[in-house]
Amino acid sequence: MSLFKKKSKEKIYTRYSGQANVHAWKGVVERLSNPEGTPDVLDDILVLDVSYGNFSGIIAASLFAEFGAEVIKIEPPEGDPCRKMTPYGRNVKGVGIPFIFEGRNKRYMTLDLQNNPDDRETFTKLAKKAAVVIEAFPAGDMDSWGIGYRQLSEENPGLVYIAVTPYGQYTTKAEEFRTFPDADITTQTGSGLSAQIGDLPSEPEPYNWPLKAGMWMGWYISGLSAALGGTVALMHRQLTGEGQMIDVAGMDAYSSMTGFPPSIGYTWENSRPRIGVLDFILYPYGHWKCKDGLVAIAAPRDHDFRALLKIIHRWDLEDDYRFTPDRIPDIIEQAMYLHREIEKETMKETADELTKRALTYSMKAARSKWRGGGVPIVMRVMTPEMARQQKQWEIRKSFLEVSDETLGKFTITTGFAKMTESPPKVKWISCDIGKDNAYVTEKYLS
């Protein structure tokens, strides 16, 4: 049933609610939700992905493929080692689940670039027609084989060449760790991310250990950085006809996206510590226990904090010298005291009760000049299973069932960006080694 035909509380956007605006925005929302019939903006772009044992390059190539580029995954006859990387050893027909997910709209060709000079020559011929090359070999390897940026750009001046490594293509550190295998955990560890995640160092072992992020944060950010840099380079190429080399270091990619912690650490002359349930900037901003699980609470501004105290009936904390006006948790014991005092109240109610009370207060505050405009955020901390049951996924078409002759049927996430005119789309997923050898040879090498 159409979103616009049923009388429900599902609305386009709160700011555009109301019957007149629903009809005005109907076409926009339908285009946002349906990528069919829209153009593939990169359909004239050929991308050669020769990343090896590195999901950063594979992820970058997937993003190009979703926007319509012809992406050819080039791997040795035995396949990329990334095919074997998978949670708990689970695979489908010998292919790991992450590799399957990243097989969106890709072609597969086998070339042994490390050992076969004839295959390198074939690759050189392909690269003459390519707009983008993505590689993740140790710095300098492609150049030593005669197929690096230096050589390929002579034959193809418009080539956008993306190299992804842990420490980049230059510096003493890059030389020292040139053959260091790239892994997501090395990026997280080497960039300082792991040292910032986990309980307070004063907690008993093993709770005081540094933690890695619960996803491939390093690889995904490096891949996103590579794809973004490559896209801008393609725009430059369109304007000038010039290609360029893009040097992505995993350590740079993550560190550049941490934002303020490095700057604050430099200002304070002290690095950001592990602070567990606390937040580095303002407080309260974190997770609290409640009757039936956990809630996330964000009340960073002073009037948000005062509103939260009203909601949990702890106005007595408002004028405590420890919390007014400075709630930056540079004194850990002080912040933990406040955390425990708030949790005494959240433990008395369920997550839904706390969320409803916060929403009710916030709506009234938005209409009342006497409430100070405080808008504390309270939300249930959901498990993946709970989140998957939410109706918005279905309405936004965030999941897609795909089918492959070899792999069978499975469900993937899709449509990471909703766009009215040129959205990303998934046409197929396949992973058979060398399945497109004949296709690539006939189209680009004949």
Image (tube, helix red, strand yellow):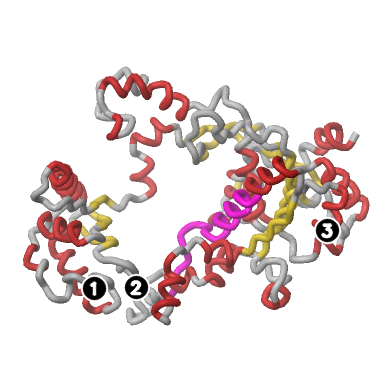
Tell me the amino acid under the disc marked 2. Answer: Ile
Camera-nearest label, 3 or 1: 3
- For the residue pair 127 and 369, the one nearer the viewer reads as 369
Q: Are marks 2 and 3 in contact (CB under 8 Å)?
A: no
Q: Secondary structure at mark 2?
A: loop
Q: Which mark is residue 150?
A: 3
Q: Of residues 243 and 177, which is closer to you in this image? A: 243
Magenta highlight on residue 227: yes
Which range of residues does the magenta coloring cover? 209-230
Residue 46 lies in quadrant: top right
Q: Is residue 136 left or right of residue 348?
A: right
Residue under the point 40% across and 36% down: 393
Q: Are marks 1 and 2 in contact (CB under 8 Å)?
A: yes
**Is 63 located above or below residue 309 in the figure?**
above
Q: Residue at x 57, y 22 (%)?
A: 37
- Visible in this render: residue 259? yes
Check disc 2 and report the residue beneath it. 275
Disc 2 to disc 3, C-alpha distance: 46 Å
Relative height, residue 403 to residue 160 (above, below): above
Q: Which residue does the image show at 46% across and 62% down from the upper left?
A: 213
Disc 1 marks which residue? 335
Q: Residue 215: image x %, image y %?
A: 49, 57
Residue 404 picture location, percent across and down: 63, 33
The answer to which quarter of the image holds residue 241 is top right
Asked if one can make out residue 96 in the rendered structure from this viewpoint, the answer is no
Instruction: Choose mark 2 or mark 3, whichever is in front.
Output: 3
